[in-house]
Amino acid sequence: GLPTEMRGQAMITLVPREELVVNFANRTNVRGDSQGNFEIRGVVPGDYTLAAEVFEQGKRRSARRVIQAGTADLDDIVLTLASPVSLSGYIRTEGGGAIDLSRIRVYLQPLEPARLGGAGTGEVRSDGLFAVENVVPGRYQVYVIHHSDEFYLKSVRMGNQQIAGGELDLSSGAAAAPLELVLHAGAGQVSGMVMNPENSPALGVTVVAIPAESRRNESRLYKPVASDQSGQFTLKGLVPGEYKLFAWEEIEPGAYQDPEFLKPFESRGKAITVAENGRESVQLQMITADSR
């Protein structure tokens, strides 16, 4: 058995560490008994994240641990459940323009693939204040969900500290200071047309703006759209910066965020710089389904 410091019917999940995006088919789930003991059989050797979650009085407590499975059994693994934390802060806007803050949501996307409870979401008040409750300790990327093509999340600060890439570490508990999020009215736009190998407009092609390599850990910067019946497309709400544009005839949703998938196509992308309030126009060549 694998005794743990847990009580109640905890859900224990084992996830391969090499997964970039969680593939639920590769996850192993078991229930702990009333004493917190659990056992997972038939584990293939490799690196894993072992995670546990239990609900107590309406609150989610969780634990996680990286393990290395070999040919011998692993016994007496201990997972200690941590209490949820709260995150508060405020949003301000700059650059002109108008946006209804009360329709905005602050979204915390887990950076660990084995996160059981999913993301945390908080509503924003009309004065810009927000709170995200019952957040499982861990590392997150901060998003602001809104419906404006004009604004983009320009900066994330905690006190006097700039949070690079919007990556927030709540592993040790609540944030030390309120979070300041700045929405700036200056998003860019790229439009154009996709051509097939016969040099005719290609409809229904997935066009993706992929950020520069130094920012590819920020999934909020990836922008996909499908070309219309005339082969035309428009990517809106782009954060100013460097991108490569790709046009795939066929691609699995989100596959373009996998570096290994993207590697053989790097030379097929069209480099482009999106300026503040920029409006760019390009023509792309479709990457056919049999290309690799």
Image: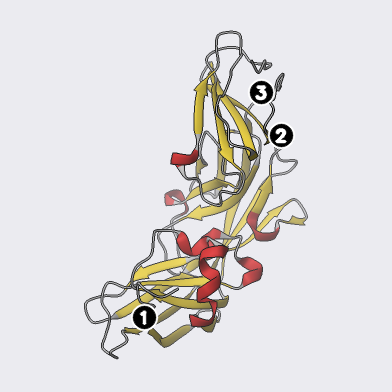
Q: Quadrant of residue 66?
A: top right
Mark 3 secondary-structure assignment? loop
Residue 210 location, x and y as percent? 52, 71
**Disc 3 residue crowd, few under 14, some 14–19, many 20+, Cα 10 Å:** some
Q: Earlier in the sequence, mark 3 or mark 2?
A: 3
Q: Name the secondary structure under disc 2.
A: loop
Mark number, residue 286: 1
Measure how far apart labels 2 and 1 are at the Cα level: 47 Å
Q: Residue furthest top?
A: 35
Q: Amino acid at mark 3?
A: Leu
- Taking the image as shown, residue 174 lies to the left or right of residue 28, namely right
Q: Which residue sits at x=70%, y=56%?
A: 163
Residue sitting at the far left: 229
Q: Residue at x 60, y 51 (%)?
A: 141
* Residue at mark 3: 81
Residue at 69% of width from left, 28% of height from top?
72
From the viewer's perspective, is the residue at label 3 or at label 1 nearer? 1
* Residue 228: image location, x then y, percent: 26, 75
Q: Is residue 278 above or below residue 254?
A: below
In this view of the protein, which residue sits in the foreground, 169 or 111? 111
**Nearer mark to the viewer, of 2 and 1:** 1
Q: Amino acid at mark 1?
A: Met
Q: Nearer the viewer, mark 3 or mark 2?
A: 3
Numbered mark located on residue 79 in the image: none
Q: Are marks 3 and 2 in contact (CB under 8 Å)?
A: no
Q: Residue at x 54, y 77 (%)?
A: 266
**Residue highlighted by disc 2:** 173
Where does the image place residue 262, in percent across and percent down from the top left?
52, 69
Q: Which three-letter amino acid code belongs to the residue tagged 2? A: Gly
